Amino acid sequence: MLLLQATEAVRSASAGAAPASCWDTAKTVAETLKAVAEGFAFLSAGAFFLYKMFSGYMIANLTLGLNCDRKFSGQLGVDYLVVTASVKKGDRGAVTLHDAKARISAPAPEEEALKSLSGISRLSYKTSGKILEIREKQSESSPLLNLSPGEETVFSTFFRVPSDQPCTVDVTLLGVWPWHFKTKYQWRASQVSLPIDKAPVLASVKT
């Protein structure tokens, strides 16, 4: 359509002016084709951007892994269950972490079923001369951690669980992508922790 309009414009200009040379006509047509090509390239780039956006390219990509390690606590009938969440940021944008929690299905008596993973918050600091020192409290001005593209980290916690019961562990990570500040992103992972295998006790047989 643009090419037809450009061709008609060239014809109208030629009809109302003195006959142009072949070189001038070729130059006009070339400039018109260049403008049409640039417009097509612009439209194609816009369409490609929209395709990427609606196909999920503009969603923050992050990989959440989960590992559970169960050991005897030294107390009869109770095990320690260590929950470790590995986080790897993908190649698109940065993610600001807001919260990370682990929930277990079978806590020991007086044990919490839901805990925050340790290390999720950004700590404050103080200046001692020319040296910066970490303070053991969350920063008030910048309380949240940021993960840049390709960055990896690990968060963990532990629970006390009954040694004779299987336990389901669910980890939830909550964050935002500054480019999509209105969208809240959530990643989840789960794993089942079985009781520790115990070797069977064989009774001695007297002969």
Image: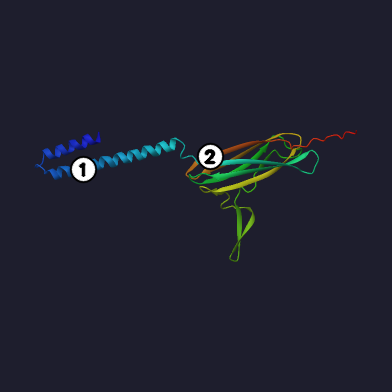
- Between 116 and 36, the residue placed more toward the observer is 36
What type is the residue that disc 1 sits on? Ala
SS class, disc 1:
helix
Instruction: Determine the residue located farthest toward the front in the rendered image.
Output: 207
Which of the image's four quarters has the N terminus? top left
Task: Tell me what residue is drawn at x 23 percent, y 36 percent.
Answer: 3
Q: Marks 2 and 1: which is nearer the front?
A: 1
Which of the image's four quarters has the C terminus? top right
Q: Tag on residue 30?
A: 1
Q: How is the image coloured?
A: rainbow
What type is the residue that disc 2 sits on? Lys
Instruction: Determine the residue located farthest toward the bottom in the rendered image.
Output: 129
Tag count in the figure?
2
Q: Position of residue 37 (x, y in %)?
A: 27, 40
Q: Position of residue 118 (x, y in %)?
A: 65, 47
Task: Tell me what residue is drawn at x 40 percent, y 39 percent.
Answer: 49
Instruction: Determine the residue located farthest toward the left in the rendered image.
Output: 18
In the figure, is residue 108 to the left or right of 32?
Answer: right
Q: Tag on residue 160?
A: none
Instruction: Determine the residue located farthest toward the right in the rendered image.
Output: 207
The residue singled out by tag 2 in the image is 184
In the figure, is residue 138 to the left or right of 202?
Answer: left
Task: Tell me what residue is drawn at x 29 percent, y 42 percent.
Answer: 38
- For residue 164, what is the image quadrant? top right
In the figure, is residue 53 to the left or right of 189?
Answer: left
Q: Tell me the crowding category of disc 2: few under 14, some 14 to 19, or many 20 or more residues within 10 angstroms, Cα based.
A: few
- Between 199 and 109, the residue placed more toward the observer is 199
SS class, disc 2:
strand
- For residue 126, what is the image quadrant? bottom right
**Precedes in sequence: disc 2 or disc 1:** 1
Q: Position of residue 56 (x, y in %)?
A: 47, 37
